[in-house]
Amino acid sequence: MIRVESLNDLWQARESLDEPVAIVPTMGFLHEGHLSLVRAAKKRATSVVVSIFVNPTQFNQETDLEVYPRDVERDLALLENEGVDLVWIPTNEVMYPPGFQTWVEVGEIANPLEGEKRPGHFKGVATVVSKLFTAVQPQIAFFGQKDAQQVAVIKQMTRDLNFPIEIVAVPIARENDGLAMSSRNVNLNPEERDASVVLYQALQAAKIAYDGGERNGDALRLLMKEIISAQPLASIDYMSCADPSNLQELEVIASEALISLAIYIGKTRLIDNLILEK
């Protein structure tokens, strides 16, 4: 497994990779969810590149960036065990050199939900992902479905900017009790960890109602709200029942819907989602 930091070293190493090449962008502190992306990539591509970069421009609060967990050496050991070919660990100076002033902004699909609650977040995401795509030149890119809006934003950007890259969303990796795997879960104390299962319980309750014939968006949102509100350690940031294609809230579900939520458990913000299909 090759490890590089500079762009020149990346480009030199990239020339030695057999096609097709897949990229798995990460911010490190890897867990089973990230590794599921790597395994999916290895099934589709001859060579797999993983990037590790805690992107400062997608954080709204400096304190959140400072406490974001990091363990690069552990990450490298996990990736080598998975048979990754190349790991790119750029520095801030590589990604945002002095005088940097060029940004990628995606339109309406980036505005609701995470976009509303975290202004500028998707500007940072779209910019850094476009730089990863340009530098690595992959044919396929793998992202986790847990960040459902991020996947939608990146698909829109890829289409709009004519990147010749297939975007693959990999199903959410979950703990045994349903909690979506996340690097932020490490910030939960034992009591908060027990309470965090309420996110999955709310989504499952909405799915059961939908499978039973409920098609009213307000009814599903209210059901999730009631379940979350019954957990004393939980506070709601947002909850949604939206059209997966544009993330606009639905009054009535005609075909399918993305139900998603962002919840604070103590001071830790967690997100999760499910797709409701016929």
Image (cartoon, helix red, strand yellow):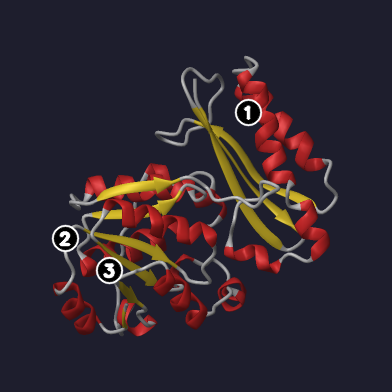
Dot 2: element:
loop
Q: Amino acid at mark 2?
A: Glu
94 up-or-down from 105: above or below: below
Residue 24 visible within the image:
yes
106 up-or-down from 202: above or below: below
Residue 113 as seen in the image, left or right of residue 140: right
In this view of the protein, which residue sits in the foreground, 172 or 113?
172
Q: Which mark is residue 19?
A: 2
| Foreground label between 1 and 2 | 2
Q: Amino acid at mark 3?
A: Thr
234 up-or-down from 60: above or below: above
Question: Mark 1 highlights which residue?
Answer: 207
Dot 3: element:
loop
Residue 105 visible within the image:
no
Give percent across and percent down for residue 44: 28, 51
Q: Which mark is residue 102?
A: 3
Give percent across and percent down for residue 94: 31, 82
N-terminal-most mark, 1 or 2: 2
Dot 3 alpha-carbon crowd within 10 angstroms: few under 14, some 14 to 19, many 20 or more = few
| Mark 2 → mark 3, Cα distance in angstroms | 30 Å
